[in-house]
Image: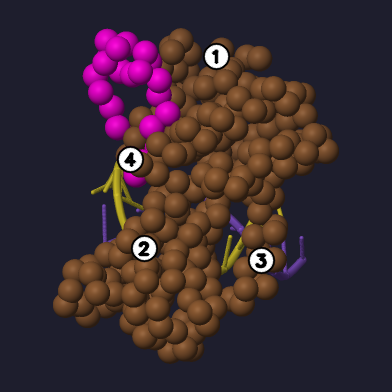
Chain colours: A brown, B purple, C yellow
Amino acid sequence: MPEGHALHRLARRHDEQFGGHPVRVSSPQGRFAAAAAELDGAVLERAEAHGKHLFHVYAAGTVHVHLGLYGAFTEFPLPAEEPRGQVRMRLVGPRGGTDLRGPIACELLTQDEVDSLRGRLGPDPLRADADPEQAWQRIQRSRTSIAALLMDQKVLAGVGNVYRAEVLFRHGIPPHTPGRELGEQLWKLIWDDLVELMADGVRVGRIDTVRPEHEPEAMGRPAREDRHGGEVYVYRRAGAPCLVCGTPVSTEELSGRKLYWCPVCQAG
DNA sequence: GCCTTATGTTCAC
DNA sequence: TGAACCTAAGGCT
């Protein structure tokens, strides 16, 4: 489930499991073998996330992981079992181990390379050092839609297709509205809402965006779980009745990703 | 068992 | 704009 909340959750977990301990690092699949050999036995100082990027910090360098669409970590207890399938990176610490499969990136970087990578990312609602004003500056300078801007990791880091659809619904904003037309006040409200929603996602481990008064139980409908594991207003609900007004949810493809919105609740 | 789809990004054209 | 990356889950047969 790789939107920003999932990466922050992983960073926290890896910190607990491996932080401050020497770890065995290997690459059963071989594609990370050289770096793994270099790091094997080193102390994992800490793990942290910025947007959808995960970093494992060692004295010798930092492992940068991006899960992409398919990547996933799977934990296993000790003693470690034989790796199954294509395992790019295996970490084994004193309390257990984890296997990384199918990431889009798993590479050992220098501090300069990490700085340059992070310099290309916008502020992350889940980081204490994030400045929403920085995102607003970008939005103001662009003529593109708020839907496209929310997914642009240079504008802000960590929001994916689910949080995009849901935050726009929660604020009644038509997705094609040019971002700059929202105004700074409304942008701040959106940002604050993302901070809250995503922090909740880190806590719970899934994306829940439906307000208590709109939950199925409160609306007299049976409880429901979406495929991503939480409860949402519009994401992946094309054609289904809007949870608030009953209008069928609209969908459309925007630069290769599906957009979902309620044409009535988000009429502007 | 096969086909489609997906919470993402990069690169080639 | 489309393909590639490379994996899992769900729907269908």
Chain letter for the residue marked with disc 2 in the picture: A
Question: What amino acid is labelled 2 in the image?
Answer: His
Q: CA separation, marks 3 and 1?
A: 41 Å
Is A37 left or right of A157, judged from the image as shown? left
Q: Quadrant of residue C3?
A: bottom right
Can residue A26 be seen here? The reply is: no
For marks 3 and 1, the one nearer the N-term is: 3
Residue sitting at x 55%, y 51%: A51
Which residue position holds label 4?
Answer: A204
Residue at 44 percent of width and 66 percent of height: A46
**Callout 4 and callout 3 share a chain:** yes
Residue type (three-letter) at the residue carrying disc 1: Cys
Query: Mark 1 or 4 closer to N-term?
Result: 4
Badge 3 sits on which subunit?
Answer: A
The residue depicted at 44 percent of the width and 39 percent of the height is A199
Q: Magenta stretch?
A: A204-225
Circle on res. A14: 2
Q: Is disc 2 surrounded by few (<14), some (14 to 19) or many (20+) residues within 10 Å?
A: many
- Which element is circle 1 on? loop
Q: Are marks 4 and 3 in contact (CB under 8 Å)?
A: no
